[in-house]
Image (tube, helix red, strand yellow):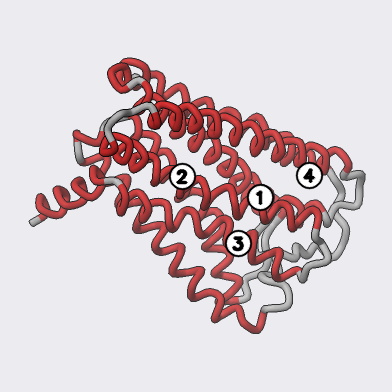
Amino acid sequence: LTGIPGLQHLHHWISIPFCLMYLVTLAGNSTLLCVIKADPSLRLPVFLFLSMLAVIDLVMSTSISPKMLGIFWFQSTAISLDACLTQMYFVHAFSVMESGVLVAMAFDRYVAICNPLRYLSILTSPVVAAIGLATLLRAVVFMSPLTFQIRRLPLCSPAVVDHSYCEHMAVLKLACGDTAFSNTYSLSVSTYVGSFDSLLIALSYTLILRAVLSLSSPQARKKAFSTCGSHLCVMALFYIPGLLSMYVERYHQELPPHVQVMLADLYLLIPPAFNPLIYGIRMKQIRDGVRRAISRRR
């Protein structure tokens, strides 16, 4: 691993915001999980989905940040092929999982706003667990062939990945064999996941918008929109940088390598750091849960 190509002389400075974002990710998501676990009033489906999102963010960020900071601080660039493929698998599989959880959260908001009286009877604990298991299995099924295919390909020498973590396209450039399948498969999976999940989210929010606009009370409409605000912010943080990074990687390779790598890094660092802050600031139940947890400690 080279770190950020062309900016090695700035690695120590770049490491400061990257390290801060990782620490915020650890503190914010861990706090969120502890508050939800400790407060019985936060056992609703929306908070179970939020817990899934926090775990995914912790795993995804931890899969790249320690090694990346090791490169920045100690020039610890060496990584074995198995470790590199493991990191690649975790990064991409948990990205697919996060997209699935965001779809589930959109469905949760649809049920809460359009069928509030049946909310707990529709999203029971077994249903929430089944949705979580389905997102996990989908990620495993989609990403396993990609990893095994790259493992079978012969690698050229020198095996240097021009990236700060083992991103799929960067690793694939090392292969000396036929990479047509891996290229086509990865593009198909990313297109399917992005398009299908975005379509389901758009459908959920179209139905939500129609239901909200039919409400007669302005206060009720405001409250309904407010409950969706956090989720919309988190979706924007996840999908916009992700789509931008993928688009630049595939179709604008004339851009300097450090721009491509920085975009890919920020895509994996910013959402996990900001997600717990967004939910903590915008959701009254989370703020109240934090206050209750602090008061109990006193």
- The amino acid marked with disc number 3 is Asp
Residue bearing mark 2: 232
Viewed as shown, does residue 25 lie left or right of 173? left
In what element is the residue under mark 4? helix
Earlier sequence position, callout 2 versus callout 4: 4
Q: Residue at x 35, y 20 (%)?
A: 115
Front residue of 228 and 47? 228
Whether 153 is drawn above or below 257: the answer is above
- The amino acid marked with disc number 1 is Leu
Nearer the observer, disc 3 or disc 1? Answer: 1
Whole-percent x, y for residue 33 in the image: 32, 45
Q: Residue at x 27, y 41 (%)?
A: 36
Label 2: few (<14), some (14–19) or many (≥20) C-alpha neighbours in 10 Å: some
Residue bearing mark 1: 243
Residue bearing mark 4: 150
Q: Which mark is residue 265?
A: 3
Viewed as shown, does residue 251 lie left or right of 209? right
Viewed as shown, does residue 22 lie left or right of 185? left
Contact, mark 1 vs mark 2 (Cβ under 8 Å):
no
